[in-house]
Amino acid sequence: MEILEVTDLEKTYRSPDGEDHRVIDVPRFSMAAGEHMALRGASGSGKTTFLNLIAGILEPDGGDVTIDGQKISAMPENLRDRCRAANMGYVFQTFNLLQGYTALENVLLGMMFGPGADAARARLLLERVGLGNRMNYRPRQLSVGQQQRVAVARALANRPKIVLADEPTGNLDQALAAEAIRLIRGVCDENGAALLVVSHAPEVLEVFGRVEWLGDINRATRSRTVSGPRVASQ
Amino acid sequence: MNFMMWRLRLGVLAIALRSVRHHFLSSAITVLSVALASGLVMAVFAINTQTYNAFTGGPIGFDAVVGARGSQLQLVLNTVFHLETSPGNIPWDLYSGLESNPAVELAIPYAVGDNYEGFRIVGTTEEMFTRFEYQEGRRFQPQSGGRIFDSTQREAVIGSFVSERTGLVAGSQFTPYHGLIYDRQQQHDEEYTVTGVLEPTNSPSDRVVWIPIDGVFRMPGHVLRGAGGVYRAEEGIEIPDEYKEVSAVMLKLRSPQAGFMLDQAINRQGQAATLAWPIAHVMAELFEKIGWVVRILELVAYLVVAVAACSILASIYNTINERRREFAILRSLGARKSTVFSAIVLEASTIAALGVVWGYAIYGAILYGASIVVRAQTGVVLDIFRWDPILLVAPAAIVALGALAGIVPAFKAYSTDVATNLSPTT
Ligand SMILES: Nc1ncnc2c1ncn2[C@@H]1O[C@H](COP(=O)(O)OP(=O)(O)OP(=O)(O)O)[C@@H](O)[C@H]1O
Ligand SMILES: [Mg+2]
């Protein structure tokens, strides 16, 4: 069964000089339940835009996104928010931690709008990302890599059916990156969640069976030149 | 509401409280302005109610007052509340006539003309203590160790407030001053002995020095014009009744019909005197006349409330822009638009609620200050802890208004676009 189905998805931005600029034009894209895949693409090619469309944070200009049989792209905003809270975990490229709250509170807040706050699970996840001794630190008091790991813990907290991760290891060293991706994959497997990771890091890409270039699925971008050599899928 | 919803409410509350704490200074200032507004509204209404009750229905005890021809209001203020000046005197036989009138249950003479350190000295009879009840079943009672005066002696019974202010106690001696306004130069020669301090009544009577009425007649320098000519009392010689005069006669009537009857006889047919009856009605008229002052005070209080509501609105509204990213993140985590909306409304209500809680302190402070002034001026004691519906109505209304004020910033937060506010640069 497909957990995620995308058909004829289109998104056009208006550039500052007033011209319309098509960023996303994906005729077909899908992921099976529990499937893990990596997505790569040049900077500015629309990876974040694509994830935001899937998450229902952005509204597409055309086409459909279906999550677990529910057409999220056709939902009113309120239902989209609810659907996102119930089904998705999202590690943002910019982390998007709440500045006024501690690491633990950030994870708890993420749970609050989903199945409900579970402090024990929140602590456990923070421990698993190596922040057992930083739970009561605010984002400002954490290093960038630590913030990223809080974002990972938050995204996994609700046992989502699908996890979107936008360069979740971008600020971690190789060893930590490998460790973080192992953790994400591990938690996803525990819950049977699908995982869509945007990344360029070889140590990340090498562990994924399915690696795709955005350019291959997105007709609006046909470049694969910028971000280094393509890693062959096994 | 199921368990999950309950948790969601908690989350909303957490967000609201966090923001109140995060913007501590502006929250505190807003809370203070709400507290002032709430305290002021409650105080204006409560003081008005309490003074109104004290002056119209409080411990008055008498039904009517007869005094010199003139204003009923002045008569009442002068006798029942021991304020203002006496409008003049009436002959003694008017008192004797009323005393023997079968429609009159109790008639007590009231004669003024002197003071002790600003507290008026009132000449009266023993009946003021033995028969008069200022409230059902309650008489002016000397505190333990004291007794009421002997009508034939230069003795005085003083109100509790007089004792408190002047230091006079049972056994003290004092010399009266002439006139109702304290003037050091105007001291009489005669000495009076305090025989008792009265139990507090929390009424204007606490500010009175009571002496036998004969003492007023015989005070050196006083002249009696009861018979037209001038008569000076002399030591040891009985004063003929026709020379005596009093400022007023306080009446307790047997029935309301008696009031109509006396009104007819004294106010409509008579020329010599004025009957102020019913006293509560005369005072209610006064409050009607000065009602506009109260209205203005209320209006000012309402304006302060409006300003406080606006400051809630402005203080939160100003934070919305800086918090747009926070709202976007909350939304991206699955918080609904309505959740963000209610968090802001809750934040506004929380500030208002904190404000009204402190408002009770402000209310207490205002009432405390006002009660000192009112007591010193009139003897009426305001009770800070007296229950008044306004103490619930005003805070509830202000919290509701606070929530209402929160709707404007809440709507601004509600309309935050998630995607454009998610990136850290905006
Ligand atoms: N709000 C916007 N208005 C106009 N153009 C936008 C907007 N957001 C993104 N774009 C444009 O859309 C394109 C895709 O942006 P996106 O953030 O999806 O890229 P990306 O693939 O995630 O890049 P990176 O690897 O650097 O994160 C970019 O060229 C960007 O300029
Ligand atoms: Mg991106």
Image (cartoon, coloured by chain):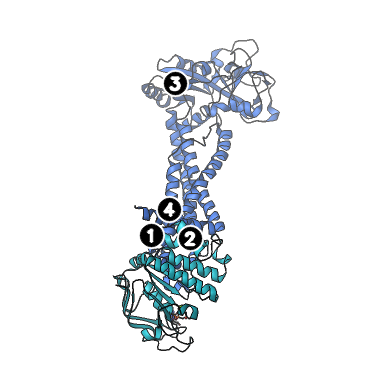
Chain colours: A cyan, B blue
Q: What residue appears at the point 66 percent right and 19 percent down from the top-left corner?
A: B220
Disc 2, disc 1: CB below 8 Å?
A: no
Residue with the mark numbered 4: B401
Q: Which residue has dot 3 on it?
A: B252
Residue B386 x, y percent position in the rendering: 48, 35
Mark 3 vs mark 4, foreground winner is: 4
- Subunit under mark 2: A
Q: Is residue B7 left or right of residue A137?
A: left
Residue B417, image x, y percentages: 41, 71
Q: Looking at the picture, do discs 3 and 4 lie on one chain?
A: yes
Residue B253 visible: yes
Classify 10 Å Cα crowding around label 3: few (below 14), some (14-19), many (20 and above).
Answer: many
- Examine the rendered structure and indicate whether residue B121 appears above or below residue B352: above
Precedes in sequence: disc 2 or disc 1: 1
Marks 2 and 4, how far apart in space? 44 Å
Query: Which numbered mark, 2 or 1, is in the foreground of this view?
Result: 2
Kind of element beneath mark 1:
loop
